[in-house]
Image (cartoon, grey):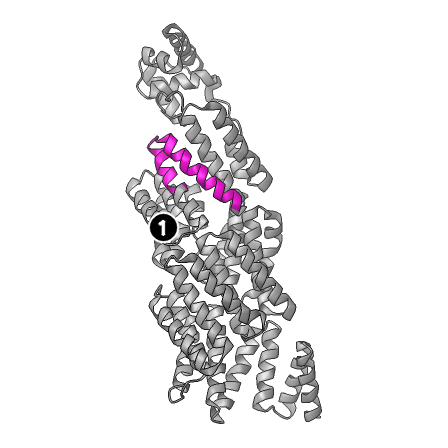
Amino acid sequence: MGSVAVERAREASADGDWSAARALLERERAEAGLGPDDLDLLARSAWWLGDSAAFRDVAADVYRVRADAGDTHAAAMVALELALSWTTEGDLVIGRAWLNRARRTLRDVGECPAVGYLAYLESGLAIEVDDDDGPAARAAEMLGGLAQRLDDEAVGALALVLSGLTSLRAGRTEEGFGDLDEAMLAVISDGLPPQWAGDVHCTVVHLCHELGDLARMRAWTDALDRWASALSRTFLYVGVTRVHQLQLLAAEGSWDVVEQEVGERSRSLVGSHGWVAGEGYRELGDVLRLRGDVTGARRAYAHAADLSVSPQPGAAYLEEEAGQRAEALAGLRAAAAETTRLGRARLLLATVEIATRAGDRAQAETACAELEDTAARYPGPGLRAWAHQARACLLLADREWARALRLLEDAATTYRAQRSRYALARVHELMAQAADGLGRVDLAAVERATAAAIYDRLGAAPDVARLAPQRPPGGLTEREVEVLRCVLDGASNREVAHALVISEKTVSRHLANIYLKIGVSGRTAAAAWARRRGIEAEGPAPKGP
């Protein structure tokens, strides 16, 4: 029975029937035991079926069998695959423990492919966890030489990946993506083992997301989808790919699809790819928040946090909406302290917006300056748009309408090209504010209507309600509110008349009507009434562009 079952399992695996191979091998293992190669095949069957926990359990046995047999290189490769699996799941402690075991296993071994995989994984962790590019740059050079001496395509591909990542993080975008594109040739030709090919794909997609380069993210996600789908529908990276696709769909505004699917996709990845699962939950939280489902958003953000993925900046926006701006800014600062410089970029725009509304100009300026510096170091459309939007927020607060409008127009062009719908709507709304400040009433109306239309198509209910036409309080007319705002600014009747291009007699009549409608007897009481109802002083608006 044993040899026949094992032979059938090998045939099933060759045909990609991993379920049959696993069932046959598990039965044989229970009845007669398995040799090292067939035990390894059982582990890989579990991995192809997306059962990472079972893969790790069996692979640990494979490592012991290989090490006891003195098969040092094979044992080290299994240890490295376990390190990759645990770190992908999000458990860095166990992942680093297996890395140390691989390093010890290879201590007295000369040059071999496993040495290259070890250097790749160690330097990749240095980038992602320690924000240190140095090990990757040195490892890229070492791996390039090792690949040539061993004539090993896979090691050469890993060298190109590290070279590409270090170039990208140094701001050499085209050079970096050139190396990564070349590394993809090994993936396409199956020259790189699938565990490592999937890691390369996911690393680059994540980097594109951090750069805000959605066009490149789409291209790499499409490549990942073609590669993963051709291998196995139960393959771990099929689910990973779908979460990345849903991130892009969220940006494009397909919120119904995201809300229906990303939660289940994320749940299916818990225990196998914890980081992507957490990213999916954070995306779900953002969509629910923007749709006004605060309870659902908080629940999704909590799931993300449980998987060691920060729920920021969405959680900060929720706290601000609850009137807790100080807590929101504290949460953003804490998240920024725990991530890399590039990872902080996504938090900085939110910091600028919330700090500006809180009147904390110093914090807003510091965050904006860092975002601008990051955008200069890592050239990319998304980062530049975020930096321009952040600076425009500060310029609007300073009433520098024209400068703000120019930056916002540039950001809008980028968001439109990147198909980032909600961000585009937000910029149109800010452009309306700038146009209002310039006295360009018609332009302001168009920009505000554009923003409202996008919000409505997205289903961003809170934003739709916020931009809905509001009737002035107290039965006042729009013109009477304009007069009140001038009064709040300390303007005399003559100054009000000049600002609104009406006569002083008309100003006096408007004031009399205001006093009568709101039940007060003078300017001071009228000003107090207006402040309590959220009417703000804006001062005489400049005329013309």
Amino acid bearing label 1: Ala
The answer to if 409 sits in the magenta stretch is yes
Identity of the residue drawn at 53% across and 62% down: 277
Left or right: where 172 falls relative to 88: left
Q: Position of residue 30 (x, y in %)?
A: 63, 88
Compared with residue 60, is residue 120 higher up or lower down, i.e. above or below?
above
Callout 1: 10 Å neighbours few (<14), some, many (20+)? some
Quadrant hosting residue 479: top left
- Give the residue at x 46% y 76%: 83
Q: Residue furthest left?
A: 362
Q: Which residue is mark 1?
A: 376
Q: Main secondary structure of the magenta part?
A: helix
Is residue 119 left or right of 185 when viewed as pictured? left
Instruction: Pick the quarter of the image with the C terminus.
Output: top left
In this view, the residue in front, 129 or 323, is: 129
Q: Is residue 272 visible?
A: no
Let me know if residue 173 is in the magenta part.
no
**Which residues lie in the magenta part?**
389-417
* Image x and y of residue 446, in percent: 52, 28
Residue 40 in view, yes or no: yes
In the image, 346 versus 515, the foreground residue is 346
The quadrant where residue 543 appears: top left
Q: Is residue 362 above or below residue 124?
A: above
Tell me which residue sits at (35%, 34%) in the image: 397
User: Of 480 and 181, which appears nearest the observer?
Assistant: 181
Please tell me how many numbered marks the rendered image carries.
1
Q: Secondary structure at mark 1?
A: helix
Task: Give the percent coordinates (x, y) of residue 236.
Answer: 58, 69
Q: Position of residue 443 (x, y in %)?
A: 49, 27
> Looking at the rendering, in which quadrant would you find the N terminus?
bottom right
Q: Quadrant of residue 392?
A: top left
